[in-house]
Amino acid sequence: MKKIFFTAALLSLALSLVHPVCAQPDQASPAPRSGTEEAALTSIYKIGVGDVLDIRLLNSSTPRSTLYTVVEGGSIDLAIVGGPIAVAGLTAEQVQALLIAELKRRAVEQDARVSVTVRQYASHSVVITGIVNSPGMKFLRREAVPLYVIMAEAQARSDAARVSIIRQGGATVIVDLLEDPEALNFQVRHGDLISVSVKPQEFYYIAGRINHPGQKVFQSGITLLQAILAAGGLKRQNENLVEVSRERGDGRLATTQFKLKEIKAGKIQDPRLQPGDRIEVVR
C-alpha cells in the first residue's frame, strides 16, 4: 500500500492557511460554486463574526487600541468613524477602503492612511476526525483551501487512504487517496466535516474448476491469471475457458469470456480485475 507523506514545505503552507483548535463547527458552508470560482476562493478571505481585526491609522499621532473583534451582527465598534460599522462579508482590503472613505466623509482625516489586517481567524472552520494525530477544528485563513493543507495540519497517518467530506446542504464526497492522488486538491470550505480512514477491504470471487474457490481479498492491479494462481491454480492444466462477470452501472452483470491459452500466449492482454468481480473457470 502506498503511503502519504507531507514535506516540510507543505506543512509550512498548511500553517499559513489554517489555525487549529478543538471545538465544534458553527455555520453552514456556502452553496456549491463553479471550478473557476472555487479556485478564486483560495486567494481571498471574507471577514466574519469572531474575527479580530488589527486596524491602524498610520498617520495618526494619537495612540489607540488597534484590535477590534467582529461581534454578532457582523460589525466592529470604531469610535473614530462614529460607532458600529458593518464589516462581515468584506475582505480586509475592502474594509480598509471603507474606513478611508468614511474618515474623509466625516472630515476626520482627508489624507487618511489606514491598515487593516486579520489578527485572529475565528469565523471559518472545518472539523477533521479519524486516523490523524491532531483531530478537531481547524480555522481557515482563506474562503477555501486544498484538502492536502488540512491533511498536513491534522498530521494524517501514513495509512490514510480514504477521506469522506460531508458538506452541509450538499452530497458527501468520497476521495480515494491511493487511486487518485489529485483528489488532495479538492477544495475544502467552511463548515465541512472531514473523516479520514484506511481503505476498506475489498473482495473478488472465484469458482468453478479451481483448487481453492471462494471469496478472495482484492489487491489493486491484480490480473485474471494472478487471481487463478492465488486460488491454488486450475484443477486440470487443460482448463481453458474462464468467465468474468462484472456489475454494471444499472446493477446488472456483464459477462466476458477469456481463453487462458490466448492470454498465456500473449495474444490478448491479461485483464485486470476490479473489486466485486465474479470469476468462474468453466472448462
Image: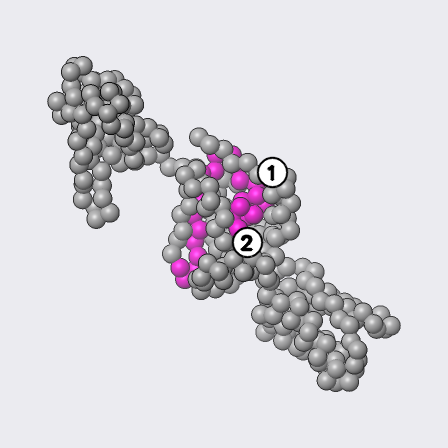
Q: Position of residue 189 (x, y in %)?
A: 51, 57
Look at the image and give the residue range highlighted in magenta.
Answer: 145-170
Q: Where is residue 116 in the image (x, y as percent from the top left)?
A: 71, 67
Q: Label 1 belongs to which residue?
A: 7
Residues 255 and 168: in front is 255
Is 143 placed left or right of 16 in the picture? Answer: left
Q: Which residue is drawn at 71% across and 76% down?
A: 99
Q: Considering only vertical position in the picture, is 175 above or below 58?
A: above
Residues 37 and 160: in front is 37
Number of numbered markers = 2
- Callout 2, which amino acid? Val
Residues 104 and 161: in front is 104
Q: Which residue is drawn at 52% across and 57% down?
A: 39
Q: Residue at x 79, y 80 (%)?
A: 109
Sequence order check: which comes first, mark 2 or mark 1? 1
Q: Residue at x 73, y 65 (%)?
A: 54
- Callout 1, which amino acid? Thr
Residue 84 belongs to magenta span: no
Q: Considering only vertical position in the picture, is 19 above or below 221?
A: below
Q: Label 2 belongs to which residue?
A: 145
Is 155 placed left or right of 258 in the picture? Answer: right
Structural crowding at the residue carrying mark 1, measured as other residues with C-alpha within 10 Å and reported as few (<14), some (14–19) or many (≥20): few
Give the quarter of the image for residue 84.
bottom right
